Amino acid sequence: DTGVSQNPRHKITKRGQNVTFRCDPISEHNRLYWYRQTLGQGPEFLTYFQNEAQLEKSRLLSDRFSAERPKGSFSTLEIQRTEQGDSAMYLCASSFPGGQYNEQFFGPGTRLTVL
Amino acid sequence: AQSVTQPDIHITVSEGASLELRCNYSYGATPYLFWYVQSPGQGLQLLLKYFSGDTLVQGIKGFEAEFKRSQSSFNLRKPSVHWSDAAEYFCAVLNTGFQKLVFGTGTRLLVSP
């Protein structure tokens, strides 16, 4: 296990379709994060899991977005009824439960293009 | 709320020259600060981090950063830039709940021959 993996790496979809992304964190990490990065911007926090519990959600995460981490391992991020404004890079990160040293390790991201 | 400002959108540096990327943060207590690098189409790689102690921190790839509380700054430096350093650099602060990173808008580094 060499790092955080994300699939697919690229996704092109038509407006109105649903998409789902997967993130596999580093195996011993119990915290998992989703961020969104639009062109020319820094990543913005979307949501965060500790084990299987979703503990925080950004207001950026509209009703069309849902994230799960059913067994506290991998996570999925689903976007329903995609809009062109959802086009972005979706980044996943994980961290070790090491108290204050919350170093987050990022995956390569999934680039979503909504036509 | 925490925030990070990276005032330079683009910086061009000649190969072999020194580099300094600016980062200013807004935070009520002692911040936990990070610098990440992102190559085109890739995720983020951690260069270095500051939590406490020595205000000059060393990172990977020959980078260092200095925490200056009086200036609310955490500037990234490298004494001699290599062409492979061309990338986007993000400064980030960890929020009060220790659960999420707040990023700046990034600085794109171009390296000229």
Image (spheres, coloured by chain):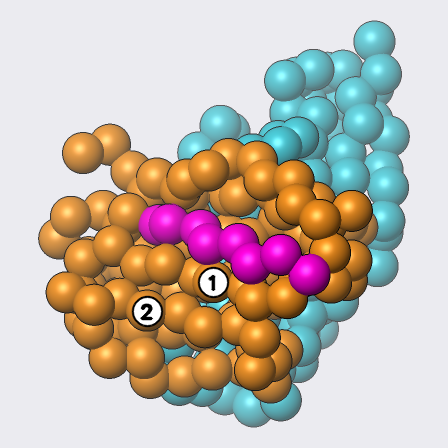
- Residue B25 lies, with reference to residue B35, above or below; the image says below
Give the color of chain B as drawn.
cyan
Q: Is residue A91 above or below residue A49?
A: above
Total label count? 2
Give the residue pinned by disc 1.
Answer: A78
Q: Report the disc number at residue A68.
A: 2
Q: Position of residue B69 (x, y in %)?
A: 60, 75
Relative height, residue A49 to residue B105 (above, below) = below
Name which of mark 1 and mark 2 comes first in the sequence.
2
Residue B61 drawn at (x, y percent): 49, 28
Q: Is residue A44 left or right of residue A23?
A: right
The orange-tinted chain is: A
In this rendered view, identify the residue nearer to me: B103 or B59: B103
Query: From which residue to which does the magenta span run?
Result: A16-23
Where residue A16 appears, as percent x and y from the top left, is 69, 61
Tag 2: amino acid = Glu
What's the magenta bit mostly, secondary-structure-wise? Answer: strand
Residue A16 seen in render: yes
Residue A66 part of the magenta-drawn span: no
